[in-house]
Image (cartoon, grey):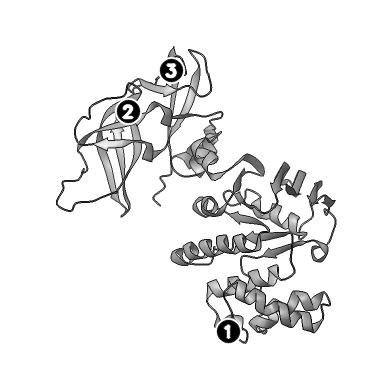
Amino acid sequence: MEILRFENITKKYGQNTVLEDVSFSINAGEVFSLLGPSGCGKTTLLRICGGFEPCDSGRVILDGVDITDQPPNERAVRTVFQNYALFPHMTVWDNVAFGLKATGVDPKTIKEEVPKYLELVQLSGFENRKPGQLSGGQRQRVAIARALINKPKVLLLDEPLAALDLKLRQRMLIELDTLHDNVGITFIFVTHDQLEAMSISDHIAVLKSGKIKQIGTPTELYEAPKSSFVAAFIGDTNFFEGTVTNLDGDYCDLQIEDFPLLHLYNDKNVKEGALVHISIRPEKFSVYATKPEKTNPKTNLLFGKVEEVIYLGAHTRYWIRVQDWRISVIKQHYGYALDERSIKWGDPVWLSFEADNAYMLDQYLEDDEELLALPDLD
């Protein structure tokens, strides 16, 4: 069931268009992420939803009601800001109780409600502390409890993990996911971190330059990106351009300049002679020190030379030269023997990948070249 809808939202600052005719809807009870690079318009869209920023045109519909012109305090929406915006002179109890007091809730109800929400965010016993006496993760929980105690229909989270270190971010992601399961309301999560978005979201909207590039589940965005921008922003990938040849049912060959002929699943049903761009994720390749036996006719075998090796604990990333192309490959460490000879820089190697693991793109953007060239080492 739809809980929130943005209709044709446009926002400009002078001559700069921050959001351009943005329209989409969000289902009740889901975690929906707005993901994109700095300056893409995601925080502006969140502020428009919260009532902190007017839009130049368009409407915001919450549970069937047009809230476009409502002030923030009259919307059934609450925001957790990146800096948490806690009152430093107030105790944890008073910070959480603030929203109820501001709306005239009687003291008896406040006394009953505050302990419930402190328990919900695992801060029972911290009632008398002030924000300066708390860790970053604890301050974030206070901000969430303060937002939730007013029972909003939608909770807005603006880069809520940006100020935390890596391990605390990972732990807080799990806690936020658990908290969402417990309260059951809609969360809208703004982030520039694709791993955060993929970890917690039911659906993700990827933005670039004020426009929605694609909306989908994390799996859809990763496995079936519509454009080079989405493919590169959601993880790491390899791009190839070639001409379709030799149609064979649902499969075809791809002739790439200065590269071996590839056999691919023709998921877009393109015609022979068409120029297409494909994306192959690094983990879809397998790497071998010796030529493997080809038991499946739909398996592609490539011969190359290792140009770079980075050991990252859970996996190793290789950059392998195949003729005139440099390919990023990830080898997962399901087991690792210290006395086993590993593949080194300069080694000749064989790569394989299945025809079904290459994905044809609807759109390849030349202005994304700079982004596409950046290796993701996470």
State the image quarter where residue 298 is shown.
top left
Tell me the kind of residue under disc 2.
Asp
Is residue 324 shown left or right of residue 181?
left
Tell me the kind of residue under disc 3.
Cys
State the separation of the CA atoms marked 1 and 3: 64 Å
Query: Where does the image place residue 146, in percent across and percent down from the top left?
Result: 68, 72
Is residue 19 shown left or right of residue 206?
right
Chain-order first, disc 1 or disc 2: 1
**Circle on res. 252:** 3
Query: Where does the image place residue 81, in percent across and percent down from the top left?
Result: 65, 65
Above or below for 313 versus 294: below
Report which residue position mark 1 lands on. 125
The mark lying in front, picked from 1 and 2, is 1
Instruction: Characterize the local packing of mark 2: few (<14), some (14-19) or many (20 or more) Cα atoms within 10 angstroms.
Output: few
Report which residue position mark 2 lands on. 324
Chain-order first, disc 3 or disc 2: 3
